[in-house]
Amino acid sequence: MRTLTLTIALSFSLSIPIAHAEEMAFLLNSTPTERAASQTRFMKTKLNLSQDEITKVQEINQEYAEKVEPVLKSSSIGFLKMRDIKAILEQKDDTLRSVLTPEQFETYTNAKDELKQALQQDLKH
């Protein structure tokens, strides 16, 4: 029984990086500029950004898309890659918090899955 549980746990843990890799494949086929532009378009509409906010958000999206690029292209193991990307995106959220109103930031936080889907649709070639 213990062997079966260990086998199931191991199989599940090994499938997570593969699932993330497949899920993130569209990112590898895009440039940081394409990703930043797509995110900004989504945020402009979803958060009702002013022109000044659009400019600042575009700069932030571009900066962090460029920071993520070497991690995406690295040969790190899926789990380590996801951990590194998560840390960069947490820094991005901290930066966005200084630009967005509390209401906008809450909407952004709640819409991250929607943003990911929009980004995936935009970047599929």
Image (spheres, rainbow, N blue to C red):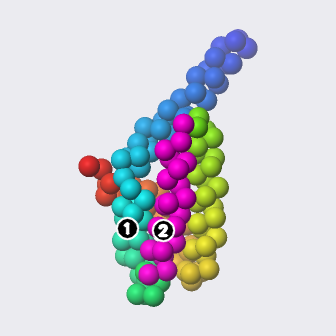
Q: For residue 42, which quarter of the picture? A: bottom left
Query: Pointer 2 and pointer 1: residues touching (CB < 8 Å)?
Result: yes
- Judged by its main secondary structure, the magenta piece is helix
Residue pointed to by mark 2: 61
Circle 2 sits in a helix, a strand or a loop, which is it? Answer: helix
Type of amino acid at the residue the image marks with label 2: Asn
- At 30% across and 50% down in the image, what residue appears? 124
Q: Name above or below for residue 20 compared with residue 46.
A: above
* Position in image of residue 56 (x %, y %): 49, 80
Q: Is 68 one of the magenta-colored residues?
A: yes
Q: Number of marks in the image?
A: 2
What is the magenta range? 55-75
Circle 1 sits in a helix, a strand or a loop, which is it? Answer: helix
* Position in image of residue 43 (x %, y %): 43, 72
Q: Name above or below for residue 19 compared with residue 62.
A: above
Type of amino acid at the residue the image marks with label 1: Ala
- At 36% across and 71% down in the image, what residue appears? 41
Q: Is 56 one of the magenta-colored residues?
A: yes
Q: Name above or below for residue 73 compared with residue 3.
A: below
- At 59% across and 66% down in the image, what residue appears? 92
Residue pointed to by mark 1: 37
